[in-house]
Image (tube, rainbow, N blue to C red):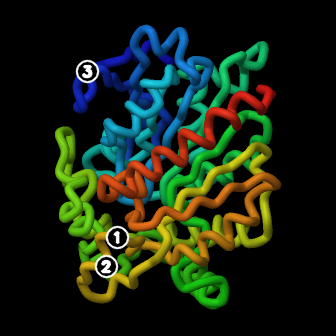
Amino acid sequence: MTGMEWQPDILGAPFAQLTLPLGDDGEGPVVATLVRSLPALPARVVGPLAHVDVLAVHGWSDYFFQRELARFWTSRGARFHALDLRKYGRSLRPGQTPGDIADLDAYDEDIEAALTAIGHGAGAVTPPRRRLVLLGHSTGGLVLTLWAARHRGRAQALVLNSPWLELQLGAIGRQALAPLVAARARVEPRGAHPMVDLGYYTRAQTEVGALPVPGYREDWRPARGFRTHPGWLAAVLTGHRRIAAGVDVGCPALVLLSARSTPPLAWSEAMTSSDSVLVVDDIARAATRIGRVVTIARIDGALHDVFLSRPEPRATAFRTLAEWIRPTINFVHPA
């Protein structure tokens, strides 16, 4: 990768990071950052997932910091990788607009650079014998779903943690809003939107004990989120429209969701045991349109990030993933 080398990561051992240069845009040099954690012996030899590579992608106003998620995979022998997309987390540079993107397809460059670094690049002479699992949360789930549908056969399994597959206003609201957002995006792509995140989701994660953790950076994950812009929202709405029309990710998919949602209008204790970001019933319906083999698991008591919930629903989410991934990844043959 252009002479770049793995460096120590802010999470400490066993994590390391690799900077992936992506050229320049109007705000300067653009990079993505790949974080890895490799399994120790004997798991990397005899673990049930020793033939698996994982690539995880975070959600909006987020970055990778979840040690427990990495340990779930490495303890079973898998090589775990997480990607901080351009202008997020480790990849955010001074003067850049956090999370700025005009087309979700532009993340193909970030993802391809990461896959090349871990041995699953499109230019490989022969298909990798190792199997690739994609793991996406929220907006990252939308990004990876669309990527997998455009690159069928590259991944052998897709795991989605509360993927943002539909707007919170529902299909009718999205269809009404999309032309207005697109028109403004053409004129003022980085114009300001009103702040709608009141910080309740971060408060809920704090109250259940998921935050703070070592390596947590509030400047990379502000309590009220980054300010959104018309160009970014137009890109997301285009992604939602594609999902609504139906896509095929070309591999088995597991969709993990909370059992219920709580509207984020005012603080409520219910937010500590529900999704206060998305309307999970709408996401569950949208998930039926992403492929031919889709498993939807509703986790009672889970937050928007099911792996940052209270201990009991978090354990249920990990157990559900464990029960699904092993037979799935061992049954599906690599492309």
Depth check, front residue: 187 or 155: 155
Residue 308: quadrant of the picture = bottom left
**Disc 2 to disc 3, how far (Cα)?**
36 Å
Residue 97 in view here = no
Count neighbours of disc 3 (C-alpha within 10 A) and say few if under 14, some if 14 to 19, many if 20 or more.
Answer: few
Disc 3 on helix, strand or loop?
loop
Q: Please tell me whether residue 180 is drawn above or below residue 29 in the rendered image.
A: below
Residue at x 64% of width, y 45% of height? 158
Residue at x 20% of width, y 39% of height? 215
Which disc, if any, is residue 211? none
Count neighbours of disc 2 (C-alpha within 10 A) and say few if under 14, some if 14 to 19, many if 20 or more.
Answer: some
Give amino acid for label 3: Ala
Depth check, mark 3 against mark 1: the one in front is: 1
**Residue indicated by mark 3:** 13
Q: Position of residue 183 (x, y in %)?
A: 59, 82
Q: Which of marks 1 and 3 precedes in the sequence?
A: 3
Disc 1 on helix, strand or loop?
helix
Q: Please tell me whether residue 184 is drawn above or below residue 299 in the rendered image.
A: below
Q: Please tell me whether residue 185 is drawn above or below residue 4 in the rendered image.
A: below
From the image, which quarter does the C terminus lie in?
top right
**Residue indicated by mark 1:** 273
Q: Is residue 312 left or right of residue 163?
A: left
Q: Which of marks 3 and 2 precedes in the sequence?
A: 3
Residue contact at pointers 3 and 1, CB within 8 angstroms = no
Give amino acid for label 1: Ser
Residue contact at pointers 2 and 3, CB within 8 angstroms = no
Q: Position of residue 44 (x, y in %)?
A: 49, 13
Residue 213: quadrant of the picture = top left
**Residue indicated by mark 2:** 270
Q: Position of residue 242 (x, y in %)?
A: 73, 66
Q: Position of residue 152 (x, y in %)?
A: 79, 41
Q: Please tell me whether residue 106 is drawn above or below residue 127 in the rendered image.
A: below
